[in-house]
Image (cartoon, coloured by chain):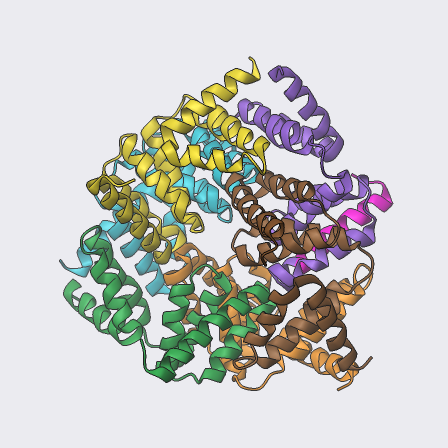
Chain colours: A green, B orange, C brown, D purple, E yellow, F cyan
Amino acid sequence: MEESDRYQRGWNKLKEIDGEVGERVVDSLKDIAPDFARYLIEFPFGDIYSRPGLGRKEREIAVAAALTAMGNAAPQLKVHTQAALNRGSSEQEIVEVVMQMAVYAGPPAALNGLFVARETFAERQTGSD
Amino acid sequence: MEESDRYQRGWNKLKEIDGEVGERVVDSLKDIAPDFARYLIEFPFGDIYSRPGLGRKEREIAVAAALTAMGNAAPQLKVHTQAALNRGSSEQEIVEVVMQMAVYAGPPAALNGLFVARETFAERQTGSD
Amino acid sequence: MEESDRYQRGWNKLKEIDGEVGERVVDSLKDIAPDFARYLIEFPFGDIYSRPGLGRKEREIAVAAALTAMGNAAPQLKVHTQAALNRGSSEQEIVEVVMQMAVYAGPPAALNGLFVARETFAERQTGSD
Amino acid sequence: MEESDRYQRGWNKLKEIDGEVGERVVDSLKDIAPDFARYLIEFPFGDIYSRPGLGRKEREIAVAAALTAMGNAAPQLKVHTQAALNRGSSEQEIVEVVMQMAVYAGPPAALNGLFVARETFAERQTGSD
Amino acid sequence: MEESDRYQRGWNKLKEIDGEVGERVVDSLKDIAPDFARYLIEFPFGDIYSRPGLGRKEREIAVAAALTAMGNAAPQLKVHTQAALNRGSSEQEIVEVVMQMAVYAGPPAALNGLFVARETFAERQTGSD
Amino acid sequence: MEESDRYQRGWNKLKEIDGEVGERVVDSLKDIAPDFARYLIEFPFGDIYSRPGLGRKEREIAVAAALTAMGNAAPQLKVHTQAALNRGSSEQEIVEVVMQMAVYAGPPAALNGLFVARETFAERQTGSD
């Protein structure tokens, strides 16, 4: 396989999952660390997200769960509650995933995750980004 | 609702998900903190795990993802890779969930999660607990 | 015991400890996850905070210490430095609890905790919330 | 104040709180990082633990709470559940402190803390170290 | 050695490494915890940063790496990307240190570190604080 | 560039840095997640570790610092204290890097790091792996 295939596949996947936010992140790295922008496209999106073997919906559930439990990545959780909606989860399913984290990472992690999810759901209704 | 319903529902759910390991944990709390044994049955299992609104398979994927990403709960990850198998995920799906965590929590967290998953899969083959 | 007793006891305890901030958190969950609002009242406040066996002052010291050491929960630490004052600790005792955390979680965690405590103490003087 | 006073005060405090375990830790640093052994005596014990302004019992409650919540320091939590007993907490109070952590760091952190506490209580009964 | 030597040495080192930001932090503690201001000067700066045995540049690389990987200390990372520049690292070397963290703490930690570094580099160009 | 170049470069770098331990990790993934073995070679070693722009010694200092501060990766810290020795740091420099972490991640993280370093230094003396 050519590197360029991997990059292209990753770029498509990034746009599919993270949308405009993902493109902005990549752009913002252009001046300081263009290679890192390339790695982000190639490894997370070209390699991992592009794998078969797990459904799109299930993969996003795994990501939303992890970001809620880790508790230090609110902006990324926002992107991925949106991605989870786009990839087959209902709002109720996302709320359930986030609440489940209270059992492992503690009630505050779930609470913060619910506030992020509410923001995502509200923007979706009003059509803002 | 009576408290006793919540306890009974939680106890059944605990046995269904964590199996004998769960029962042993509860037993081991009897002498030092019997109320905490009850809370573990009532809140995580009676309240959260018993909720509708998210499929059994999806709920376990969320838990396995979070425990891999948090990275400090190998024994619990072991229980939940087993639970994930019991509740509809294939070995390959679990491997995908764990590998996905490399993107958020870093390659070492995923690597450690893969070693736990391999142990679970091996015991299942030989029929040991 | 009836569930409703547990809820009522938790609600009273939440108001006693977290004050208006606690009520606002519960209200803000009403539209997205009303059950989680109920769980927050029942498990942390109805079950855990309502237990005898540890003094009110000591319980709040434990919470303020943990939130300082965990280092990712500044808003909650603020609520609980206020609660610690309300429940019998002096400002100096709270400062000591926070400084003690430098020994385990590192000087920056203690430093951030001190800044949160200073904010609480200042608002108290001026009577703002 | 002379540095030597600070060292002596710290050394006495270390022995008082951590007992033989503390002395062994300091000894074990002698060959690789003797200055770090000195810093451990001077800063945590000579400076922080020696401060007035917070009761001995309350200070140990803060430490046991933090170590339970941080969740990555089982050996140190063991030392400090013992220290908490020595400094005025009952077994029941320690159990309450540890259970309280379920509310912030999640049920598994509290569960692991309870297992450490049980070990401390058992050794105390049999008179082993 | 007199305590006062240690304080003076730490104060000089603090100004050398953290610059005005460090002085402001110390000042801001004067009303709430003046002893902690003193400890910050004495232990991190008077004891640790003042040690021989590791080059100034290498010591700052270690600090910038750790703060990036820990991921919960953006303001401090900012101070230390500046300090790293002052103490012999080029912008490119700092970028490399931060990108290296993707391998251990995950791509998001590195990404956040790059954004902090970019801010530092930009302010340096414009001569702002 | 061909993917195969990236893999080969990563494989050489892995052997250079992690030695036999690295090869064993890769081998152990062959049955459960062979693609992840490939990613580990390609991304951390083929992409990141192979970059110019930061000296070998400095890169390993960054890694040892981060692993000490993160505090949940003792086996990896062991590999990288060895790698740091191989790549130009003296034992004393490694000890300094680890002690510096007390300032950010707290004394216990540095203490645990020192114990890992001591083990590495001892094995080196006796020639065991």
- From which residue to which does the magenta span run? D110-129
In the picture, residue D126 is in which quadrant? Answer: top right
**Quarter occupied by the N terminus of chain D:** top right
Apparent side of residue F6 relative to residue B3 in the rendered image (left or right): left
Image position, residue E52 (x, y; %): 41, 21
Of residue D2 and residue D114, the one placed in the foreground of this image is D2
Image position, residue D122 (x, y; %): 81, 49
Of residue D105 and residue E127, the one placed in the foreground of this image is E127
Question: Which residue: 32% across, 30% down?
Answer: E57
**Quarter occupied by the C terminus of chain D:** top right
Apparent side of residue D21 relative to residue B124 in the rendered image (left or right): right
Image position, residue F12 (x, y; %): 26, 47
Question: Which residue: 25% across, 71% down?
Answer: A20
Q: How many numbered marks appear?
A: 0
- Residue F87 in sight from this viewpoint: yes
Up-down: is B55 above or below C64? below
Question: Which residue: 46% across, 76% down?
Answer: A118
